[in-house]
Amino acid sequence: MADNLPSEFDVVVIGTGLPESIIAAACSRSGQRVLHVDSKNYYGGNWASFSFSGLLSWIKENQQKTDVIGECEDWRKLILENEEIISLNKTDKTIQHVEDFCFSNQDLSEDVEEAGALSKLPVLGVSDADGAAQESEKECAPVERALPGAESWEPEKTAGSDPASATEGNNTEITTESESSHNAALGKSTLEMGKTEAAPSEISAQEPKKITYSQIVREGRRFNIDLVSKLLYSRGLLIDLLIKSNVSRYAEFKNATRILAFWEGKVEQVPCSRADVFNSRQLTMVEKRLLMKFLTFCLEYERQPDEYQDYESSTFAQFLKTQKLTPSLQHFILHSIAMVSETDCSTLEGLQATKKFLHCFGRYGNTPFLFPLYGQGEIPQCFCRMCAVFGGIYCLRHSVQCLVVDKESGRCKAILDHFGQRISAKYFVVEDGYLSENTCKNVCYRQISRAVLITDQSILKTDSEQQVSILRMPPVDLGQPAVCVIELCSSTMTCMKDTYLVHLTCPSTKTAREDLEPVVQKLFNLNTETEKETENEKLEKPRVLWAVYFNMRDSSGIDRNTYDGLPSNVYVCSGPDSALGNDCAVKQAETIFQEMFPTEEFCPPPPNPEDIIYDEDELAPEGSGFSSSPETKPEPLLEECISEGSTTVEQEHSEG
């Protein structure tokens, strides 16, 4: 295998997490020779998604901390006298305190297996395209316009005032006659398809179907369970990058449909858009006017400094108390719109967070967030695919023993892999988890507490079962962090029918179970089927069928000078952070790329296929992994792949 690898590259990237994958794609797009390796047998690292059986294997590996790849015994003989080495980790130490629990009926017999079970993960291989293409291709082009009829909090702008979305303003307000008729037909068909998914209120009042553990195992391939739980802000850096680079054609997205709040012991839906505010039955007319007035102020707060400058040294929560807002409105704004800390967030930070939330309204729907179908783990793979399209080489299950450093210059010259092959490069990008304890001895890491639940009902039952909801739970006790809860339905292609996938995330103060179980107990019923349930538990709380807790290392925001003895041409990428969005990963990837190649554009749009002139020797052979239809047919707008209804999404996927 190793003999087939070239011995020299421009950039070697170790780890396939989101920032590393973006860097690899950007380098390959700019014409650099890229080798992208990962010691794991799956893409994404701590950003990955797993089927249920895949997650069980991941849990077992992290509980046992096994080292599956051996090493070449003679690799140290390849080091010259004027060279020294920086050893890399052989075992992943970024995951701790993994605990899993089953609350459903465990009627599992030994012969029950995952239906159609195939290895999701590719075998070790080297290729320009095939290595990055996993399972079926799910293609979609970027959204460059707002959805017809989507509501926006933004004030009206003149055409061309927003270069990144020049047609957005026109599309929400003004359409041609033909566009209007098309949009009307589209709206009609969407409504008709929506009827099939909207269950009548009588059905929602019925008891949920009983799901056994054997059913979960048998339908395990229906699950795509993320290790890290995030959403995409519709005007965030990641969406802008997906559009600019045209990587979005490799993914599909679904709108988050509900913003929820936990108020006075129960879960409520938060009215955020103008229509939601005025149609809300939970707000009085006075509260509606107060809320509208405050949200309008937040959009233009920079123009009214007199309103907040006296409170710049105060917390945002204290500032809200001066705005004649009722306690419930203060709670909604603080925890469900701004999504900031009650004790640590300044007034200015709170206003900025509220404006960001409102600024994202109306681009692709009436919430600010998008979720990638099949899980967050699709996004790193999309960038890996782009890298492979432009010539990057991928090797999974390919461990790197060490970095080889020239003593005189202090620069890294090469890597040595577990086959004993020496591979030279100009630049090296390494995910933090691969660095040894000796290199990281001065680094102080934070931790993220994570929980993933499979439940039988939604935390807020409505007529429509297909909801993607986000809830920010206030701290249970003083000094505890707030907990972000994201609930996914089956139309996101992350769980089986009649179940929900619930992700809980917060910065760690203790183990994940200690941090998150109090919130789980507030929202869910943890009794097993053999235990007696109270009437309130039967009628109100969804039941947890299965759960896993774990702590994940948060290596974001670390100064590279903190790492000991790191050569100047070795760049470190952090793992996931605890924030809801992906801005940290995108900023880091762009910063590292610009440091390596300051004169190159970061992820420019790919050329149109019609504009490419091939020499005869450069023509791609038929049947190659990425020479098929995506590059030869007109691309639809990504908005066509952002669906509100599960029926529409499933039809698009089956037809694709």
Image: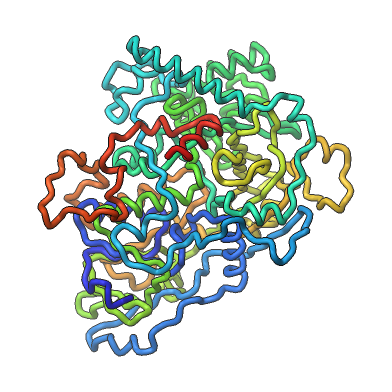
Q: Residue at x 43, y 63 (%)?
A: 122
**Residue 275, placed above or below residue 376:** above
Q: Position of residue 503 (x, y in %)?
A: 61, 47
Residue 425 vertical position relative to residue 331 in the rendered view, above or below: below
Q: Residue at x 22, y 85 (%)?
A: 82
| Image quadrant where one finds the N terminus | bottom left
Q: Residue at x 48, y 54 (%)?
A: 576
Residue 62: image quadrant is bottom right
Frontmost residue, 335 versus 106: 106
Closer to the camera in the image, 432 or 380 = 380
- Is any part of residue 224 visible from this angle? yes
Left-right relation of 185 to 539: left
Residue 591 in sight from this viewpoint? no
Query: Is residue 50 left or right of 599 when viewed as pictured?
Result: right
Residue 105 or residue 230, whichever sits in front: 105
Q: Position of residue 369 (x, y in %)?
A: 49, 34
Q: Is residue 457 left or right of residue 558?
A: right
Residue 104 x, y percent position in the rendering: 76, 53
Relative image position of residue 379 (x, y in whole percent) = 42, 48
Q: Is residue 249 above or below residue 74?
A: above
Count all numbered tags in the image, as a single digit.
0
**Residue at point 24% right, 51% down?**
29
Q: Nearer the viewer, residue 377 or 577?
A: 377
Q: Quadrant of the C terminus?
A: top left
Q: Residue furthest front?
A: 622
